[in-house]
Amino acid sequence: MNKPVLELQHVSQSYGTFEVVRDLTLSLVKDQIGCLLGPSGCGKTTMLRIIAGFESLLSGQVVLNGEVVSRPGRLLPPEKRAIGMVFQDYALFPHLSVQDNVGFGLPHLSRAERKGRTGEVLELVGLSGSRHRFPHELSGGQQQRVALARALAPRPALLLMDEPFSNLDVTLRDRLALEVRQIIKSYGATALFVTHNQQEAFAIADRIGVMHGGQLLQWDSVDNLYRKPADPQVACFVGEGTLVSGRASAGGTIHTEVGTFFDHGDNLDNGPVQLLLRPENIFPDESSQLKAHVIQRQFRGADMFYLLELPSGQQLQALFPGTSEWSVGHSIGISARLAQPVCFPVVTSPHPASS
Amino acid sequence: MAASEPIIGAMNVKARLFRAFTSSVRPGRDSGWTLLIATISALVLAPLLVIFTAWRQPVWDIWEHLYATVLPDLLVNTAMLSVGVCVASAVLGVSLAWLTAMCEFPGRRVLSWALLLPLAMPGYVLAVAVLGLLDFGGPVASLIRGLFGPGAWTPPARSTPVIIAVLTLTLYPYVYLLTRNAFLTQGQRVLEAARTLGCSPFRAFYKVILPMARPWVAGGVMLVLMETLADFGTVSAFNFDTFTTAIYKAWYGFFSLPAAAQLSSCLVTVVFVVVLLEQRLRSRRRYAESRPIATGTRLRLEGPWRWLALAYACGVLLLALVLPVGQLMFWAIGSFGEEFNGRYLSLIYHSLRLGLIGAVIVVLASLGVAYGQRRRPGPGHRAMVRLANLGYALPGPVLAVGLFIPMIALDRYVSTFLQDAFGLEPGALLTGTGLAMLLAYLVRFLAVGFKAVDGAMHRIPPHLDEAARLMGHGGFSRLMRLHLPLLRNGLLTAATLVFVDIMKEMPITLMTRPFGVDTLAVKIFELTSEGEWERAALPALTLLAAGVLPIVLFMRAGEGAGGSGRRSEKG
Amino acid sequence: MKQFIFVTHFLLVAAFVGVWQTPADANELVVYSARNEHLIQPLFDAYTEQTGTNIRFITDKEGPLLARLKAEGASTPADILITVDAGNLWHAAEEGILQPVFSQTLQRNIPANLRDEKNRWFGLSLRARTLVYSTERVRPEQLSTYEALGDAAWKGRLLLRTSKKVYNQSLVAMLLAAHGEAVTENIVRSWVGNLAAAPLANDTQVMEAILAGQGDVGIVNTYYFGRLQQKNPNLKLALYWPNQGTGAGGVHVNVSGAGITRHAKHRAEAIRFLEWLSSEKAQNLFADGNLEYPVNPQVKAHPDVAAWGTFHASDLPLSRAGELQKRAIKLMDRAGYR
């Protein structure tokens, strides 16, 4: 087992009375790419800045390769942490050429060594031809890659990326996300980045942490986040889906208005629960008693996305084959099938599904 | 002009091509702007031309005499003074800008605007106050002799370092103001980037922040250089001979205005060459960070550093402001009864009025030129603008004469025409009227106003213009509704600098003022020209107070608009 | 709102420019003066009160005033030019800026050597450029002439004002007239060799430096001394009249004076004003305000000035100082007198 490169232990920080980060704990092992995913204002960027050493913390500690770099009263300055960082706006040095930007973090190398190393990294990001150009002469995607090359050049123990793709257009973003993952992997770097875009997170990260209101809700593999969300908020933030009220009874049976399901694993207490229904769990079923009205229809290529409403008023999201042609207002029979139902004991207030 | 170049290069290339294309497709569409720039440039160029045409009759005997006697010393003195003042102003201005813009230490907020106040201190006033303090019979030397006996070493009041210090203490605010602004708008993010790449805050400052602020530092230093080269009031208080001494010797001593003009032309040429060299060295690097910057935190100074920072900033203020003001007050109290009378109200009124109207005119002209250049960028405009900024490098009286001669020619031409055509005798239309004086101010201070306005103008991304255009706003409407609000701080800076400069200005005011228009600076001239320093302390203090006021107001307005001051665009 | 401000500013400027030009008045005089406003204003006020003639004036240094007059040519509004040094008056006359004036009153009131031979300018007040010494460290017997300040006895004890001031240029011009180029250059060199400190910016600084003990003797204009003396009656300084022996040349004197411009619009009135200035009443007003000597021999000097005693003044025509000024400057430059 790899030993962790980064460990965050019960980190908290607040501005005045506002808690930005609350009791956050996670660890990232070597060669892993981690991601903090959450809506804006959830504290993910602050966490990144705490790791980088730009912000102090109120309690807890940050451990980098076994060394405590931040704890209350001690703050190792950023330049001593061996961290690379890609900023949201790249923060390229406008007065330096691409080559000098990339070589900036290598003052200890001789001129020739620096040139070699710079060339190597630029090769990696595919910008060998642009070494003498200035940042403002590059496109957004190229600037992004220069920023990545610059951060990687000093072989940082940990690479941090703050919303690295938010300034790029959508098609470029998807392509570059995969490319960046390849670069980081081929480089053998450990990285942590933050984003509000789950597609990005899925594309790059090995492990994702979902943050909300300063708290880390779940720190897990992409698969687990989707299939075994730890709480309703994660369930709704990662992927699409609806929570449907129901009742659990002894033996793991869950009764809801869309049907009865059986939970094999977890021991559920008797009482009200909420069941997660992903769009792919709903199927058209002419024979079904359960009827729903089509409220919205959205073309998604191979699939057709439907927003349905049950007689009770409960809404459901569904993904049917692209050939289905029910129009808005149409009433159809549906059924739900779940291999492994995910349900949560009821919390006081219902959570709206968000996607 | 120094600050504008790289940013022009920085403008979106596509946008420039687009604009070049559109303007070539519709010829004459914006030719009004060319006319405006040409007119303003011509105004400034007229005195320069007059000065250079003095070479039609070279006054070789004076040149030979100067060359054989004083000129070598003068050149050495001038070089020492220029280099000394520029370096010291850069060090002082940049370090103070760095401390107040990027660090946190006790008193930072107040100091950040208080450090601008020495702008209001005319060099000639500080010179005399310093002499009063440091001279052989002054309190400092007397104290030292009292403590250590009559033979004790006392600081030499008339030494080159003291003169460099005096000029630096009155001129560093130019560098401070422009640089601080650059730091505020581009500092934090790249600083953080540099630190993740292994730079300590100090190294990051040296490697990244400073090089990025270079156009603004250079712009400030250019203003300092021009002021230093053109200065006569300050150096003559110390009887320190510089190149301007030769100019005045040629004029007042040898009664040869042509020789004085020829010498002045050398001064202008040197400044022009320095400007060109600086711009060439910058090549195609880009400096402006036009993106809105994210909030970053100031570097919190720890332990003794915070007190050192405070002591350093306070020390500068003490030397530049507190001690000299103390000396002036001491004198003013002694001469108050003799000196104060009802006429002071009229002096203050004239000073304020001139400063205000002059500032408005210079700022409007700067705005016109900067906006015209934005609408129709091109090498022709750039060259005209660059030349138009040279007025600042001329010694005031030489500029005044250079302006006076074409004005009189114009007056004569117009009155002859009116007389021939209509039998009218209108008298002088320009000379001896407020118009002449305001034109002279425009010529002299365009560089100051333009630098501030143009810097701010270039921070407005070109696509904003395009967006406004698509929404159906024509040129004037765009200026009023888009640029003016965004330029607010740049205009305020320009107005403040010009206002204070005009209030301090002496030779042009003396030469071009209409009858009966006496200002505080004129009053100071009256009293000091006959060595009545104690009596001049009162108008000097009044001048200082009148100059401090707009600086404080402007700084507060600027800081207020920017919240933490980070959004402000004062450079 | 913004448009409103914009327009207001334009109106403001237009109004300002318009209002500031006051029309020319028939019953008035226009004066360009290098003599300070607080010294001439009382005279103008008195004259206006007496005659009803309004006087408008501007003050500036001689150089710019002359340049302005020259540039304005025939369209100049100026009737009278007042300067504080004969050299400048001489130069103005040479440049053709001044016109000759024949007035019995002026001829009578002003001694010949204090006015232009061609009657283009007239001295109105007299100041002596003389020696000043520390009463603590110098006995008057040790002093004799300007020239003797170069003696070895004064090594490191002499203080001088800058050679850029016209007063010193006139003084050296007088020596030049008396001794010729070579001798004068040696005298100036010997002064420079005796300096206790680099030349100072003004006469007051010279006296303050002597008071502070930086040097023991200097050359100053009498009124600067008078001003200091009025402030501090127990001043440990005294004036010395040099070059008093027969053939020694006398004390160097200079004038503050005036001339009528060639293109004066109010010539007759201007002559009346000059005549009035040379009259008894005006002479005291003119001279006493600055502790100078009246040029009119009939008029007594201010008591404080009279207390300095009488002296034999140089009778060299002042126009000579103007003629020789350029040579004097060159000579001082060569001698290293800054």
Image (cartoon, rainbow, N blue to C red):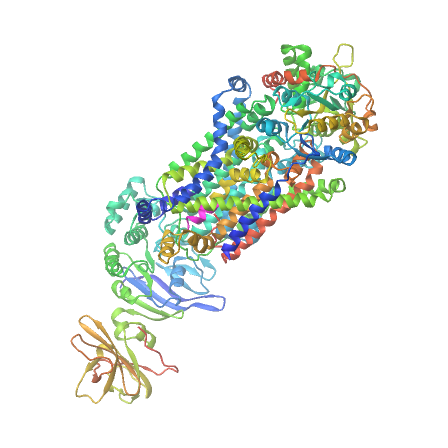
Quadrant in which the N terminus of chain A appears: bottom left
Quadrant in which the C terminus of chain A appears: bottom left
The answer to whether residue B568 is seen in the rendering is yes
The answer to whether residue B138 is seen in the rendering is no
Whether residue C8 is situated above or below residue B128 in the rendered picture: below
Q: Does the magenta stretch include residue B458?
A: yes
Q: Is residue A19 left or right of residue C41?
A: left
The one of B257 and B537 positioned closer to us in this rendering: B257
Rendered image quadrant of residue B400: top right
Q: Where is residue A320 in the image (x, y as percent from the top left)?
A: 19, 77
Q: Is residue A318 left or right of residue B270?
A: left
Q: Where is residue A317 in the image (x, y as percent from the top left)?
A: 26, 78
Q: Where is residue C63 in the image (x, y as percent from the top left)?
A: 61, 27
Whether residue C179 is situated above or below residue B344 in the rendered picture: above
Q: Which residue is farthest left?
A: A323
| Residue at image point 51% right, 38% down | B443
The one of B122 and C53 positioned closer to us in this rendering: C53
Q: Where is residue B12 in the image (x, y as percent from the top left)?
A: 34, 49
The one of A96 and C5 positioned closer to us in this rendering: C5
Classified by dominant secondary structure, the portion drawn in magenta counts as helix
Range drawn in magenta: B452-459
